[in-house]
Amino acid sequence: MKKSAYTSSGRRMVTAVLAATLGLILAGGLAACSSQVSGKPGQTVLRYWLWDSGQLPGYRQCAADFEKQNPDIHIQIEQFGWDDYWTQITASMVAENAPDVFTDHTQRFGKYSSLGQLLDIEPYVKTEKFDLSHYAPGLAEQWESADGKHRYGLPKDWDTEALFYNQDMVKEAGYTQEDLWNLEWNPKDGGTYEKFLARLTVDVNGVRGDEPGFDKKHVKVYGLGYNEAGSGYGQVQWSPYALTNGGWTWTEKNPWGMHFNYDDPKFQESIGWWRSLIDKGYMPPLSVASSGIGTVESLGSGGYASLVEGSWNIATIANATKLPIQVAPTPIGPDGHRASVMNGLADSIWVGTKHPKESWRWVKYLGSAQCQDVIAKQGTVFPAISSSSKKAIETFEGMGFDARAFSVHIEEGTTVPSPVVDRWAQVDALMKPAMSSVLAFESEPSSLTEANKRVNTLMRSNRGKD
């Protein structure tokens, strides 16, 4: 297998780049990267990292099942929270002590693959004629190199977004579940979707957002919640609107786009409408939304009547409240259809592993129906394999959720792949303050044109660097 990052000068260059990326937090990250590796005599120990504690029990079961079939291998699972996870991954690569296999994200893998930190598994896939067709459409392709010759992960799950809502509040507002499946939005008057949000919003005096005398400065229940401005991604913030207005998407192609489109008038129009919900009192101000009280907690306590959220949070929301929460799909937009980002995680192998063949056996098992059926029964995510996804839908429906609100995007072909670029962290760093400024009413949506120039300048001038 090719390990170009580990040839003398290349190795020093990659280490320097990763260390620069890690910056001042490097020392703390490195200290935490060391771990005790244990296994029975004669066993190969593979370290496997993931960030989602909710999925930990399922993957422990997968590891136990795998070890029964592969007694020569022991899987040592380590879990970190989302923010720590990527610091630890980068630090461990600098220290040349990264986990053999780790859960990878489309927003991150571009950087690591461009720096030669991921093992190309395409030779294994071809040699074993591994079937990629059993994955949901588009998932396997997200993990290919720009030239399509290399592959850096096998899909493990997929997610889309939906509108979580308080059933009691919706019923009191005069809406049925069927009504929510037919909501439409537009940037001119907000359509039936904005009317719905207005009706769900209630001020401290019990006056609704669509009634005379509504006090938008003293709101008790917001019709729609959110957590922050969405930076350059907006997956559970503005993506359902931007992706259904004028055919907009992040880059000129995906994956491996080089030109961003935050200067598109249709995109800025969508952001302007979304922001107007704050001015009307139907959404909280940015300072309130980002105050530290989570969106799930606010939905669970009755502070938010509805919330755009990802399928990965179904179990979290179900366990966070006794309130009756249900889901409906995102609204239909001006383009005549609804849309959702479809992101998929994968398991990648670190290029520096001393056990590439054993790591491939573990990744292959993680990407198999044997493991993904286990995950389906856990009710945490939708597995990447289509047959396993159907079992997950049954699990979610058993929990009382209308899981088709998520899968309808696959059925109707309205998914939009999560953007894959090799400098996403830097793009997001530029877009975060720009979007926050707009949502805080410090700048107008038109200011995103200048931010987009900075992003595209970055993409042109720093190609191949990090």
Image (cartoon, helix red, strand yellow):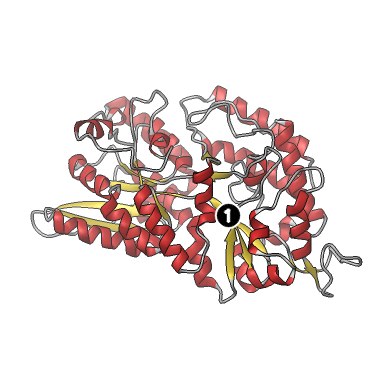
Q: Amino acid at mark 1?
A: Ala
Residue positioned most to the front: 178
Mark 1 = which residue? 162
- Camera sees residue 380: no
Residue positioned most to the left: 42
List x then y, in percent, for residue 15: 37, 35
Q: Nearer the viewer, residue 34 or 138?
A: 138
Position of the N terminus, as image quadrant, is top left
Say which quarter of the image contains residue 200. bottom right
List x then y, in percent, for residue 306: 66, 62
List x then y, in percent, for residue 374: 31, 60
Q: Which residue occupies 18% across, 40% down?
A: 357
Q: Is residue 119 above or below residue 401?
A: above
List x then y, in percent, for residue 19: 42, 39
Q: Residues within 10 Å of mark 1 (few under 14, many from 20)?
A: many
Would you say 182 lies left or right of 161 here? right
Q: Which residue occupies 77% across, 43% down?
A: 187
